[in-house]
């Protein structure tokens, strides 16, 4: 993602940086409820696609995803 400022002076990357900082802060104190609620709205396919090959392998081995969902 680029640091391009959109019309009106909006920098979308700056917002993502703040969201990531909030996620880091929440995880540091063990408060993941809001994060899980946030991730719950993302389609399962996108969550799986986000995983690295190694993590998809682990998910497949642990029965978290099906072979038909494996995209690595």
Image (cartoon, rainbow, N blue to C red):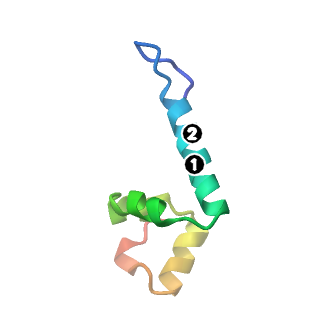
Tell me which residue sits at (32%, 60%) in the image: 43
Residue 21 visible in the snapshot: yes
Residue 15 to residue 34: above or below: above
Number of other residues with Cα within 10 Å of mark 1, as a class: few under 14, some 14 to 19, many 20 or more: few
Look at the numbered disc 1 and give the secondary structure of its residue. helix
Residue 16 to residue 27: above or below: above
Which quadrant of the figure has residue 24?
Answer: bottom right
Which quadrant of the figure has residue 58?
Answer: bottom right
Number of other residues with Cα within 10 Å of mark 2, as a class: few under 14, some 14 to 19, many 20 or more: few
Residue 1 visible in the snapshot: no
- Is 35 on the left-hand or right-hand side of 17? left
Residue 12 to residue 38: above or below: above
Residue placed furthest toward the right: 28
Residue placed furthest toward the bottom: 62
Q: Which residue is mark 1?
A: 22
Tell me which residue sits at (47%, 14%) in the image: 9
Q: Estimate the spatial distance between the alpha carbons at disc 1 and disc 2, rounded to whole Å.
A: 6 Å
- Residue 27: x %, y % from top left: 61, 62
Q: Which residue is mark 2?
A: 18
Tell me which residue sits at (55%, 76%) in the image: 57
- Residue 17: x %, y % from top left: 58, 38
CB-based contact (under 8 Å), mark 1 and mark 2:
yes
Look at the numbered disc 2 and give the secondary structure of its residue. helix
Which quadrant of the figure has residue 53?
Answer: bottom right
Tell me which residue sits at (67%, 61%) in the image: 28
- Residue 41: x %, y % from top left: 32, 58
Seen from the viewer's position, the closer of residues 26 and 2 is 26
- Is 37 on the left-hand or right-hand side of 22? left
Residue 12 to residue 54: above or below: above
């Amino acid at each position: 993602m680029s640091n391009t400022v959109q019309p009106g002076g909006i920098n979308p990357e700056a917002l993502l940086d703040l969201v990531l900082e909030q996620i880091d802060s929440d995880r540091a104190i063990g408060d993941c409820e809001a994060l899980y609620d946030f991730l719950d709205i993302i389609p399962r396919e996108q969550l799986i696609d986000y995983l690295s090959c190694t993590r998809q392998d682990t998910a497949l081995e642990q029965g978290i995803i099906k072979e038909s969902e494996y995209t690595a």
